[in-house]
Image (cartoon, rainbow, N blue to C red):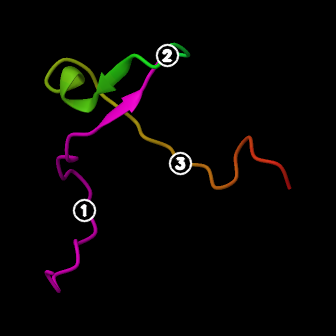
Amino acid sequence: MSSTLPSMPGVGDQAPDFNLPGTPDGDQVSLASFRGSKHVLLAFYVFDFSPG
């Protein structure tokens, strides 16, 4: 097991590619599909749409 922790990205760093379900049907959307053609803003909300 590696003891190296991932470093925090800096302003202007390229995000690593990942896939997420992008539609209610579960169709996958890849970050790489936007690279070079569109700007992408990722926002994460803790507990958004969750009970409590």
Residue 44's mark?
Answer: 3
Q: Residues within 10 Å of mark 2 (few under 14, many from 20)?
A: few
Residue 40 or 5: which is nearer the viewer?
5
In primary-sequence order, the first of circles 3 and 1 is: 1
Query: For residue 27, which quarter of the picture?
Result: top left
- Picture quarter with the C terminus: bottom right
Q: Secondary structure at mark 2?
A: loop
The range drawn in magenta is 1-22
In primary-sequence order, the first of circles 2 and 3 is: 2
**What type is the residue that disc 1 sits on?**
Gly
**What type is the residue that disc 2 sits on?**
Thr
7 is within the stretch colored magenta = yes
Residue annotated with mark 1: 10
Q: Secondary structure at mark 3?
A: loop
Give the residue displayed 26% in from the left and 56% down from the top: 11
- Picture quarter with the N terminus: bottom left
Give the residue displayed 34% in from the left and 31% down from the top: 40
Asked whether, in this view, residue 50 is left or right of residue 32, the answer is: right
Which residue is situated farthest in the front direction here? 1
In primary-sequence order, the first of circles 1 and 2 is: 1
